[in-house]
Image (tube, rainbow, N blue to C red):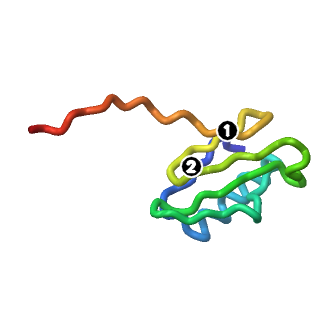
Amino acid sequence: MDSTYEWPRGATPGDMFRLESWLAGHGWEVDPTVYMAGAGGATVQVRRIGAAWADGEAGLLILPAETVVWDGTRMRIAPRAAVPARCPAS
């Protein structure tokens, strides 16, 4: 199974279904108690299947346009590529 998933800006219900399927294949799920909508699209919280907040694992918050990486043990957000800042032309 693929080890990365890109959560798109402006995610659709189909994107959510694909995310849920991908997570389930790794033993994770979307936390139904945390969902935020913003200008860039939906932000979702994910956690291990069956995990409770009392287990001490807070899960992972995924923002629009972030890539999630499964490292074989846990989920994490992939670092964004370093892009040098440019000054606008005068």
Location of residue 74 by image quarter:
top right
Q: Residue furthest bottom?
A: 13
| Above or below: residue 77 compared with residue 44 | above
Say which of marks 2 and 1 sits in front.
1
Asked whether the beta carbons under mark 2 and mark 1 sit within 8 Å of each other, the answer is no
Label 2 packing within 10 angstroms: few (<14), some (14-19), many (20+): some
User: Which residue is depicted at the point 45% across and 63% down?
Assistant: 39
Where residue 32 sits: x, y (%)?
76, 65
| Above or below: residue 69 compared with residue 39 | above
User: Counting residues from the N terminus, which is met first, the one under dot 2 or under dot 1?
Assistant: 2
Location of residue 78 by image quarter:
top right
Where residue 14 sits: x, y (%)?
60, 68
User: Which residue is depicted at the point 88% across and 52% down?
Assistant: 52
User: Which residue is depicted at the point 76% across and 64% down?
Assistant: 33
Assign the N terminus to one quadrant of the image: top right
Q: CA distance from mark 2 to mark 1?
A: 12 Å
Instruction: Give the amino acid at mark 2.
Output: Glu
**In this figure, which residue is indicated by the disc labeled 1?**
76
**In this figure, which residue is indicated by the disc labeled 2?**
6
User: Which residue is depicted at the point 61% across and 63% down?
Assistant: 36
Q: Nearer the viewer, residue 39 or 1?
A: 39
Q: Nearer the viewer, residue 34 or 70?
A: 34
